[in-house]
Image (cartoon, rainbow, N blue to C red):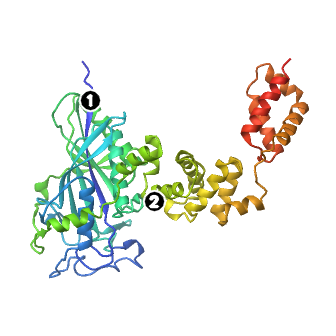
């Protein structure tokens, strides 16, 4: 009998912390704006003999904030350790990290498993470490830029509780959203500030065993996470079905070819010879300090989603869309607070024309200069039928491009909605009289022509006729012309 397999997935998420200085020295952490390679460096971050590290207080606060947001326990006594390995981007020959006592551990996050079922994924640990330098590979040599070396890095390690690629994606998406809500990471994966590593094995469904796993390194997009995980799951299943053995190894992801590639045998903790960092004392955190960090927690995405559903009558998918970004959620609430229109109507405008313009223009919600109060005025003008939906789109585009007041733009462009029933009736009658062939075809059963008739009304009135009035009169006119 052919076995049915299930994946066993654990994720490691590495995120750079938004601090002004590096983790253990005062050099600028903004390596992306450095004037030239190796300009934001000092004896500490380049590993020169005798240079002593000092812990970045802000990075510690941000790490604790993330731990609390992920329902972790904060270790009041946590320590740093040396992770020993050699690579050209590691100037000291070791990385300062945390091992036995991380800053936070034993948390959890609720995710969707892809079939609307909720799954609790345990968070094993959240720990602080330092980023490596960047390598630029030429044909015969490689250049090293140490501007990134020592930048504060947070590693979030899940337990292997994930059983579907969809759940892995949801977990990664929610962690990114939390990091952005907290303001600790930009979430800009194109710049490499957030990276995923997937530990994957497969086993027969119903089995409790943990089989040999592989680790896919440096996945820098959600798409790469999904494709690489799915490929690796299928690869391992095929190996077992053919009677083979999965080798424990570290893999890379070739996005162009769509395959995982072997890099080296997978290391275990003992391979790194962890030992306590002798240059840094244990980090001791008081209860009062932990509570002061807890008081800084904002309303997080899950709580905000639940509130949007209960307070505004939105569907779960509508609420999740609006709360996917903190800036977007705040913008929506500001529009609601300044508008008389229903919250669902406001959602429709933001999810529709508003986001369409941003996407077409390559803008993010953070770059929007259109005031929520102004958008509220525009939406209200459409809701109370001062202007039609088509005119509303025209005004929105004008507001995005040049700003201004919605009412003034409507006046200047002569966009007021035509609501005079007799005037619309006259136009409908003329259209029906001028197109007897189409009228006969419609009444013979070609109902798709109705939209054509409505299009003629829109053309004749330049989109200003009240669509509900026009529709009612058109239905009546066509009915009267039935033979």
1 and 2 marks in contact (CB < 8 Å): no
How far from the left and from the top, in percent, is residue 58? 27, 72
Asked which quadrant contains residue 68, the reply is bottom left
For residue 30, say whether it is visible.
yes
Q: Is residue 68 above or below residue 310?
A: below
Q: Secondary structure at mark 1?
A: strand
Towards the viewer: 221 or 449? 449
**Residue at 39% over, 51% down:** 304
> Considering only order in the chain, which callout, 2 or 1, is on the residue closer to the N terminus?
1
Whether 329 is drawn above or below 141: the answer is: above
Residue 169, image x and y in percent?
36, 45
Picture quarter with the C terminus: top right
Q: Nearer the viewer, residue 432 or 383?
A: 383
Count of numbered badges drawn on the protein: 2
Q: Where residue 214 appears, x then y in whole percent?
A: 23, 44
Residue at screen point 11% across, 61% down: 274
What's the distance in space between the residues labelled 1 and 2, CA to CA? 41 Å
Q: Residue at x 28, y 74 (%)?
A: 22
- Please give the residue where the numbered disc 1 appears in the rendered image: 5
Q: Is residue 425 above or below residue 324?
A: above
Determine whether, in the image, residue 414 is placed left or right of residue 298. right
Relative vertical location of residue 283 with respect to residue 467 in this rendering, above or below: below
Answer yes or no: is residue 259 visible: no
Relative to 98, 396 lies left or right: right
Residue 331 percent across, percent down from the top left:
50, 58
The residue that disc 2 covers is 327
Q: Quick check: 155 left or right of 402?
A: left
């Amino acid at each position: 009998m052919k076995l049915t397999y299930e994946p066993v997935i654990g994720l490691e998420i590495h995120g750079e912390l938004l601090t002004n200085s590096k983790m253990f020295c005062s050099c600028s952490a903004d390596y992306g704006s450095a004037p030239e390679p190796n300009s934001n460096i000092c004896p500490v971050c380049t590993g020169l003999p005798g240079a002593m590290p000092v812990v970045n207080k802000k990075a510690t606060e941000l790490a604790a904030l993330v731990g609390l947001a992920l329902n972790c326990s904060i270790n009041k006594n946590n320590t740093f350790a040396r992770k020993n390995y050699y690579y050209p981007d590691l100037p000291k020959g070791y990385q300062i990290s945390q091992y036995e006592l991380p800053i936070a551990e034993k948390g959890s996050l609720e995710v969707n498993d892809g079939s609307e079922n909720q799954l609790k994924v345990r968070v094993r640990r959240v720990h602080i470490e330092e980023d490596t330098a960047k390598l630029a590979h030429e044909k015969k040599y490689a250049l090293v830029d140490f501007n990134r070396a020592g930048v504060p890095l947070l590693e979030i390690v899940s337990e292997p509780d994930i059983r579907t690629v969809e759940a892995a994606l949801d977990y990664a998406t929610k962690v990114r959203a939390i990091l952005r809500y907290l303001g600790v990471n930009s979430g800009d994966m194109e710049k490499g500030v957030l990276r995923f590593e997937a530990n994957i094995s497969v086993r027969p469904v119903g089995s409790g065993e943990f089989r040999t796993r592989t680790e896919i390194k440096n996945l820098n997009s959600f798409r790469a996470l999904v494709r690489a995980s799915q490929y690796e799951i299928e690869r391992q299943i095929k190996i077992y079905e053919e009677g083979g053995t999965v080798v424990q190894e570290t893999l890379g992801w070739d996005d162009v070819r769509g395959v995982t590639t072997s890099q080296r045998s997978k290391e275990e903790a003992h391979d790194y010879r962890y030992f306590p960092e002798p240059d840094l004392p244990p980090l001791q955190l008081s209860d009062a300090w932990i509570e002061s960090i807890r008081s800084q927690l904002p309303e997080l995405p899950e709580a905000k989603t639940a509130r949007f559903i209960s307070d505004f009558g939105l569907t779960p998918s509508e609420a999740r869309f609006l709360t996917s970004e903190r800036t977007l959620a705040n913008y929506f609430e500001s529009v609601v607070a300044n508008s008389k229109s229903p919250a669902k109507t406001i959602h429709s405008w933001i999810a529709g024309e508003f986001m369409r313009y941003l996407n077409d223009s390559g803008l993010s919600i953070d770059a929007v200069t259109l005031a929520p109060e102004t958008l509220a005025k525009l939406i209200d003008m459409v809701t109370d039928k001062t202007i039609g939906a088509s005119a509303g789109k025209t005004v929105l585009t004008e507001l995005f491009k040049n700003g201004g007041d919605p009412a003034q733009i409507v006046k200047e462009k002569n966009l007021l909605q035509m609501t005079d029933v007799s005037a619309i009736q006259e136009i409908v009658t003329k259209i029906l009289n001028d197109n007897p062939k189409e009228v006969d075809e419609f009444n013979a059963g070609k109902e798709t022509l109705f939209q054509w008739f409505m299009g003629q009304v829109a053309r004749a009135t330049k989109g200003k006729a009240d669509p509900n009035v026009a529709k009612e009169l058109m239905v009546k006119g066509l009915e009267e012309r039935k033979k």
